[in-house]
Amino acid sequence: MEEKDCIFCKIVRGEIPSKKVYEDEQVYAFHDINPVAPVHVLIIPKKHIKGIHWAEEQDEALVGHLFTVARTIAEELGVAPNEDAEGGYRLVFNVGKGAGQTVFHLHLHLIGGRAFTWPPG
Ligand code: AMP
Ligand code: ZN
């Protein structure tokens, strides 16, 4: 379940400090230490899973819950979509080293508070 040397497991256990945004039995969310936008939150399962590619069928409800939590946080932090063109946010999984994944504990990036371009870099 937990991995001794995983940085995000350490955050869940409180061994490494983090700025908590949300917590429940299954999920923990905190501000990214190196934000790429005014709002940059990481939403992670407390259970250690290497990344979204490695989630199993039994994790489906847990993975779905990450998105519900993301919506709640987006509302709370004021980046939910609205009539204003500034509104809206991006949800991102980097999947594997080649796609920019650096921490191998599943995390959903919630990024907002600025305009975005497509395609992403
Ligand atoms: P990724 O590149 O998708 O694996 O994202 C990992 C993210 O974790 C990066 O955006 C880092 O800035 C962030 N990060 C790494 N260590 C910490 C930490 N101790 N507290 C908060 N965010 C972190
Ligand atoms: Zn972990």
Image (cartoon, helix red, strand yellow):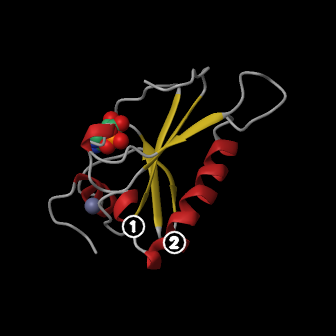
Which residue is tagged 1?
A: 55
Tell me what residue is drawn at x 35 percent, y 30 percent.
34
In this rendering, position of residue 17 left or right of residue 76: left
In this rendering, position of residue 15 left or right of residue 94: left
Q: Are marks 2 and 1 in contact (CB under 8 Å)?
A: yes
- Ligand 2, image quadrant it occupies: bottom left
Residue 25 in view (yes/no):
no
Mark 2 element type: helix
Viewer-side residue, 50 vs 118: 118
Viewer-side residue, 88 vs 54: 54
Residue 60's label in the rendered image is: 2
Q: Quadrant of the C terminus?
A: top left
Q: What amino acid is found at the position of numbered circle 1 in the picture? A: Ala
Q: What amino acid is found at the position of numbered circle 2 in the picture? A: Glu
Of mark 2 and mark 1, the one earlier in the sequence is 1
Residue 22 in view (yes/no):
yes
Mark 1 element type: loop
Q: Does the beta carbon at disc 2 come under 8 Å from ligand 2?
A: no
